[in-house]
Amino acid sequence: MIWGEYILSYNEGRISKLSKEDFEAVQAEGAAIFECISDNMPKGHDSKEVQAQIVRWRNWLENFAEYSDEAVLGLGQAYSQNQKFIDVFQNIHEDLPDFLTKAIEYYCAENKSKSDEV
C-alpha cells in the first residue's frame, strides 16, 4: 500500500521533511503493519498478535505528528468512517477498516484502564 500524496496532503509537518528514501521506508513500515494485522484478523481484535501490531502502529504514527490518546482513538474511528481510509484498507482486506477500529478502540480502552490504575 502506498499512501503517497494522501499522507503528504494531511501531514505538512514531520513527514514532509523526510528524504524520499526515509518516506518510502515509513510507507513500507506502515504497509507491513497493516498487512500483519490483516493476517492476524482471525485471532481477534484483542489478540496479543494484533495488539502488538497496534502498539507498533501507535509508534509508527509518531513519524507524522504527536498524537494524544484522544487523537489516536479518533484516527482509529476514522479508519472505518472516512471513505478514503476505507478504500485504502479494503484493498488489503474487505473487513480491515472495521477491524482496525475495534482493535484501536480496544488498545485505547486498555491503555486508559492501565493509566487509571496508577
Image (spheres, rainbow, N blue to C red):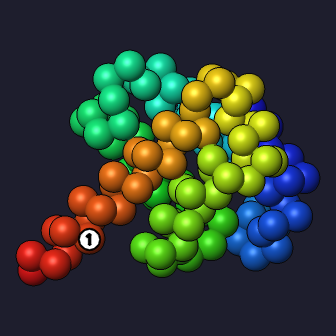
Residue sitting nearer the eye, 65 or 83: 83
Residue sitting nearer the eye, 106 or 18: 106
Residue 72 at what x, y percent from top left?
Answer: 50, 66
Query: Where is the N terminus found, in terms of image quarters?
Result: top right
Q: Is residue 10 left or right of residue 106?
A: right
Label 1: state its secondary structure. helix
Residue bearing the label numbered 1: 112
Residue 53, picture quadrant: top left
Q: Is residue 20 visible?
A: no
Residue 107 at what x, y percent from top left?
Answer: 34, 55
Q: Is residue 95 left or right of residue 56?
A: right
Vertical side of 69 occupied by 23: above or below: above
Residue sitting nearer the eye, 84 or 17: 84
Query: Where is the C terminus found, in terms of image quarters?
Result: bottom left
Vertical side of 74 occupied by 54: above or below: above
Q: Is residue 67 left or right of residue 28?
A: left
Vertical side of 85 occupied by 62: above or below: below
User: What is the three-letter code of the residue carrying label 1?
Assistant: Lys
Q: Is residue 104 visible?
A: yes
Residue 11 at what x, y percent from top left?
Answer: 78, 68
Q: Residue furthest left?
A: 117
Query: Which residue is depicted at the point 33% across and 52% down?
Result: 106
Dot 1 surroundings within 10 Å: few (below 14), some, or many (20 or more)? few
Query: Which residue is depicted at the point 85% across and 61% down?
Result: 8
Residue sitting nearer the eye, 115 or 102: 102
Q: Is residue 91 left or right of residue 33?
A: right
Query: Which residue is depicted at the point 55% across and 40% down?
Result: 98
Query: Which residue is depicted at the point 35% across and 62% down?
Result: 108
Residue 74 at what x, y percent from top left?
Answer: 56, 67
